[in-house]
Image (cartoon, rainbow, N blue to C red):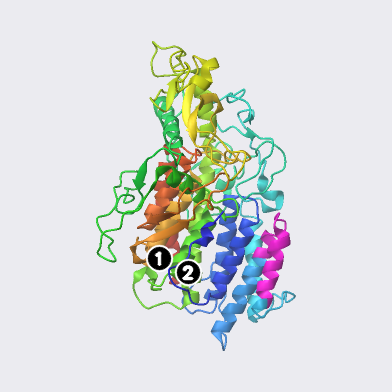
Amino acid sequence: MVAAAAITASAEAEPHTVARLWNEVMLKAIRNDFARPPLHARNLYHVAAAMWDAWAVYDDVAEPIFLKERHHADDVDAARHEAISYAAYRVLYRRYQISPGAYESLPSFDDLLIELGYDYRMTDREGDHPAAVGNRIAKLILDHGYDDGADELGSYAFEFDYRSANPPMVVANSGAGDLLDPNRWQPLSLRLFVDQAGRVQPGRVQRFIGSHWGLVAPFSLPLPGTATMSGDGVFHDPGPPPYLGGAGSDEYQDGFAEVLRYAATLDPDDGVMIDISPRSFGNNSLGANDGSGYDVNPVTGKPYAPNLVKRGDWSRVIAEFWADGPDSETPPGHWNTLANYVTDHPDTERRLQGTGPILDPLEWDVKLYLALNGATHDAAVCAWGLKGHYDYVRPITAIRYMASLGQSSDPGLPSYHEHGLPLQPGIAELITAASAAPGERHAHLAEHVGEIAVYSWLGTPEKDTEYTGVDWILGVDWVPYQRDTFVTPPFAGYISGHSTFSRAAAEVMAHFTGSEYFPGGLGEFVAEKNEFLVFEEGPSETLVLQWATYYDAADEAGISRLYGGIHPRMDDLPGRRIGSRIGKDAFRRALTYFDGTAGN
């Protein structure tokens, strides 16, 4: 797979700063680790804070976060480079020493430190030497991490008092198994579980990652107004999602049924062409999909050129591009690659908030990484706190369960159940003797007259050089557009982490650069023909994703999870709104460290 890191600027970038070098080696370590978004968000923030402190202690105005000291040096640039390197190295080495990719990651940390001219055997923490300052910063951050609520010493509390309300679903069987509560998350049982980073997980039944994450110390989140029944923190509570058979039952049924409409687009041979340029896509209101694009590129003053592609190629590409795996860096890391792309762009001027003097490249990087990763860390704390609190169902459970009950649209038709799957012509239909007759659309399902059929992706092909397309299958057998060794993430749905991470990051990028628009008014990513997709062939033609603004990219990340069958809109849209608040708050908090007023 071409990872997000393959995004490149349109001109050759200048040599990277020491902060960028440590950021890049960390992103590689994340790609070599298990796919654990909240853990990596925390690590990215702590490394960013380590580098920030190592820069700020040599400044007369900026305020460090952890090391409340001031230092002076004859060569400030050299001192900062050394302190940053030791601080980042020590945090990274501790956090990734038990990673499944440690055999690659740890030597890469050593190699970078040595390439920069430093000795990893220098472990002193006393005195004013820059290496000692960096080691001291790392010690403070690592000690903080042992007591910040993540339960790092207890392997991040993968069990942490969480007990599923539902027995596991055996995905290879039809239906949702012995489901007890259709409103609660259901772990999946797979013959082999490979996470989104491509790493084989122990056991065959998913374990909820991060159910306690609302307890983790944030960067800028306000004190929680409420606490969950189990004691997890809840920030920016949007209220409960809709419940089948309870408040919002119709919204539940319609929302999960809508996921099927997205799944029906995952075929490059359906003949549908769409314009995915900013002239047609983007410019949504916050928390909505109501945008119709832009009249002109505000940077060039010219209209955006059309970008016509096969809908089935685009829907599959965004589902995989924003899924961040395998060989990618989870959503928080993904936004670091986007930030690096922006930094490298020839049209970028390193002016904080778009005004004032041009910043030194190192100052730009350490400030950007702090604000960005402080925001994505807070997004993880908030989103996973809500996931642990509401413990909400995923589409594979909801759709299979409703289909097993029947249809909820017409009491006069067979298989009616008020909590069944809503019928949608061409998407979700009742199998009848007529529709299952030879030559008809449900002929291959003739043994299932009276059951519900859905028009959807057919599942992972036997070879990754093939693609399966879309056809009629039984609703009780529905699977999302994911590998058959992954299927759905191992944690609850509400709210969408992708939506929350992405909007928070987009707010930081817009505020930090002083413009909501990508440099030049256009951000792009190229998905090469028959090279980009992982678990099936595609796209059938080379395709270029395009976004005018950071917000457009964030919205695409959110809606991509509907195409991927991972979230319904009631997970996505609140996540966008909450992410906006988180990103703005994190940026404002970062500014107080920049100008030295954080402690006021």
The relative height of residue 382 versus residue 342 in the rendered view (above or below) is above
Residue 94 on the magenta span:
yes
Q: Residue furthest front?
A: 439
**Taking 472 as reference, is 197 left or right?**
right
Residue positioned 44% across, 39% down in the render: 269
Mark 1 belongs to which amino acid? Phe
**What segment is highlighted magenta in the picture?**
92-114
Q: Which residue is mark 2?
A: 367
The relative height of residue 369 versus residue 218 in the rendered view (above or below) is below
- Classified by dominant secondary structure, the portion drawn in magenta counts as helix
Residue 320 or residue 359, whichever sits in front: 320
Residue 315 on the magenta span:
no
- Label whose residue precedes the other's in the sequence (1 or 2): 2
* Number of residues whose C-alpha sits closer than 10 Å to that of mark 1, classed few (under 14), some (14–19) or many (20 or more): many
Total marks placed: 2
Indicate the quadrant where residue 311 lies: top left
Q: Which residue is mark 1?
A: 512
Q: Is residue 365 visible?
A: yes
What x and y, as percent, mark residue 84?
59, 74
Label 1 close to label 2 by CB (< 8 Å): yes
Q: Is residue 183 visible?
A: no
Residue positioned 25% across, 63% down in the render: 302
Alpha carbon of mark 1 to alpha carbon of mark 2: how far? 9 Å
Residue positioned 61% across, 28% down in the render: 166
Mark 2 belongs to which amino acid? Lys
